Amino acid sequence: MKPSPFTYHRPTSVGEAVSTLAGLGASGKVLAGGQSLVPLMSMRLSAPDHLVDINGLAELDTVEVSDGQVRIGAGARQARVERDAVVRDTVPLLGQALVNVAHPTIRNRGTVVGSLVHADPSAELPAVLLLLGGVMELRSPDGVREVAATDFFLGPMSTAARPGDLAVAARFPCQPPGSGTSFVEVSRRHGDFALCGAAAVAVTGPDGAISSARVALVGVGGTAVVVDMTPAVRGSGGDLDPSVRDGLVDEHVDPEGDIHATADYRRELARVVTGRALEQAVGRARDGGRRR
Amino acid sequence: MTTETPMHLSLVVNGTRREVEVPARRLLSDVLRHDLGLTGTHVGCEHGVCGACTVLVDGAPMRSCLLFAVSVEGAEVTTVEGCRAADGSLGPVQAAFRDCHALQCGFCTPGFVTTVTAYLRENRAPTETEAREAISGNLCRCTGYQNIVAAVLKAAEATVPAEAAPGGERR
């Protein structure tokens, strides 16, 4: 269980990292937190010839709010984002999802942007970016390319980032007043990858009734699956119609079975976590939304 | 085939500056054990699941098997050897583990001691539930965890100044 040899690069600026990566093309790989990459390399599932370490780049270790968006730099550790008071107030779904990401020890090193670029179909953060309609910032020598979440996630471990691109940041839209969010997942053991999970967002209209309810499901497809659940919200009370809810989930989700769970069990879990996450999100939206 | 040129690595390990030449692919866990002879850090699963190799990097618990040592160049690393008291006797967390019989074979213990040491700096008076959550990333196959939870609570008492203990700082 030792990684293959590689050539290590430690750029001292983002510009140098970008030009190094561009020169390496497909033989180069970015090392951020490494909490997914290092075990893959130890198991020899991945053997990049070159690693470009961005851990020392302070200019990437940023969490900023501007223009109604929270911008998280590629160096920001998950633990820092999870504890950030501004993030908690503006994009509470991020913190709600992050507590489900592995263990605190892993989150001390792992980065938000790294999780997004890794694009594991069981991972929590891609679902958050997709559900909220966030944007990835990919930098190359040609400049910064902005890719919407819907165009970024292509399949399991597969994104629109090209060889040589450096994902420098992800931007999450701030939660509007009168909305509520939740993240619920089921895993075999605490901290394991989710068998199935749901991120949910509910929005109240001017009359206080729920005007929109959506979920993003993880672990049941190649990427997170976004489902508009608004038709399942019954009347002004925000109650969910279970048969409409399950019908919508079944319509959009076609999970595969594996050694952890059968396809049928995953489908059942998708219904359950959808229900739980939506109920919480609706409750929080009706309580005034922004506060958890 | 990539040729491996050793890289110079400088770390402050348990308060002492250490300089070694290591290949870039060497994991921090292996540098600690093989290059520095600090075999208190145990290597279990080697892919970040078991927690036995947990050390503190600039004060924060991290899996040393999930870090290339060169990527933490210059960092302050605390291993279980650094969790002892200044006079060389057991530190408060180690003593609590002994007193509560919180170890049996001892393989997982270094990871627990480092994790709990860092946790108690953040939360000086955890509840039992919080203590369980704090150790949730560390696997033990002997004890059934009951005595480890007891040791976390006992270590918290031992490290909290007496006047702050009852009903003290809680999250």
Image (tube, coloured by chain):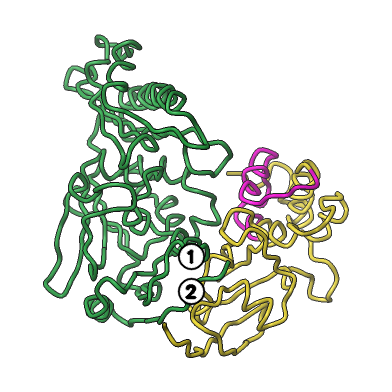
* Residue A161 vs residue A67, the one in the foreground: A161
* The furthest residue to the left: A142
Colour representing chain A: green
Q: Which residues are magenta?
A: B118-143
Cα distance in 3D space between marks 1 and 2: 7 Å
Q: Do labels 1 and 2 touch, CB within 8 Å?
A: yes
Which quadrant would the N terminus of chain B be assigned to in this image? bottom left
List the residue tagged with mark 2.
A4
Crowding at dot 1, Cα within 10 Å, few <14 / some 14-19 / many 20+, comes out as: some
Task: Give the image location of residue A213, x and y in percent.
Answer: 25, 25
Colour representing chain B: yellow
Task: Give the image location of residue B44, x and y in percent.
Answer: 67, 60
Badge 1 amino acid: Arg
Tell me if I can see residue A44 in this picture: yes
Report which quarter residue A287 is drawn in: top left
List the residue tagged with mark 1.
A44
